[in-house]
Image (cartoon, helix red, strand yellow):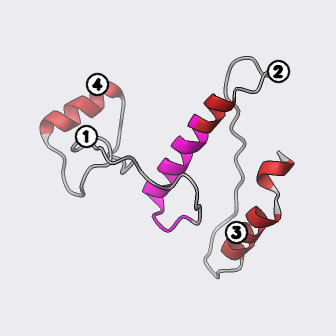
């Protein structure tokens, strides 16, 4: 964890946000994949990291990450990486069937 979370580079990003003048409370989440905790599944961790960065970019396009910020070039209209605006009824039905409650720009 020390190698991933508390490197000088990551602390610089954190400090930039802290001292930018924006209001808010810094929060650090620890995400642990399920399953056997004795083995490190690098492929699963990489997939989780990629997904979380994509989700963060959808919420905050000015995210300071450099790596893994190129979003895939596909979308599902009204469901995933959809254009702004009201989705069509069939997209809403599809989202409901999949349990997706809100359109994300992932």
Looking at the image, is mark 4 or mark 1 nearer the viewer?
A: 1
- The residue pinned by badge 1 equals 76
Choose the circle earlier in sequence order: 3 or 2.
3
Relative to 23, say whether 68 is above or below. above
Q: Which mark is residue 97?
A: 4
In the displayed orientation, state which residue is furthest to the top: 36
Q: Give the Cα separation between the discs numbered 3 and 2.
A: 31 Å
Q: Residues within 10 Å of mark 2 (few under 14, many from 20)?
A: few
Choose the circle earlier in sequence order: 4 or 1.
1
Q: Give the Cα separation between the discs numbered 1 and 3.
A: 33 Å
Q: Give the Cα separation between the discs numbered 4 and 1.
A: 14 Å
Relative to 42, say whether 106 is above or below. below
Is there CB contact under 8 Å for labels 3 and 2?
A: no
Residue depicted at 20% across the width and 56% down the height: 85
Choose the circle earlier in sequence order: 4 or 3.
3
Secondary structure found at label 1: loop
Choose the circle earlier in sequence order: 2 or 4.
2
What x and y, as percent, mark residue 22? 61, 77
What x and y, as percent, mark residue 60? 48, 62
Which residues, given as a range, are shown in magenta? 47-63
**Residue toward you, 41 or 20:** 41
Q: Residues within 10 Å of mark 1 (few under 14, many from 20)?
A: few
Relative to 8, say whether 89 is above or below. above
Residue 72 located within the stretch drawn in magenta:
no
Left or right, 106 with reference to 2: left
Is there CB contact under 8 Å for labels 4 and 1?
A: no
Residue 53 located within the stretch drawn in magenta:
yes
Is there CB contact under 8 Å for labels 2 and 4?
A: no
**Residue toward you, 93 or 39:** 39
Q: Which mark is residue 38?
A: 2
Q: Give the Cα separation between the discs numbered 2 and 4.
A: 35 Å
């Amino acid at each position: 964890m020390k190698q991933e979370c508390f490197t000088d580079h990551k602390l610089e990003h954190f400090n930039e946000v802290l001292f930018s003048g924006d209001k808010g409370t810094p929060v650090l989440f620890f995400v642990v994949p399920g399953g056997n905790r004795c083995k490190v599944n690098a492929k699963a961790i990489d997939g989780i990291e990629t997904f979380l960065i994509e989700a963060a970019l959808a919420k905050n396009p000015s995210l300071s990450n450099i790596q893994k910020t190129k979003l895939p070039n596909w979308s599902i209209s009204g469901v995933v990486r959809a254009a702004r605006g009201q989705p069509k009824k069939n997209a809403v039905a599809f989202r409901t069937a999949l349990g997706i409650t809100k359109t994300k720009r992932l």
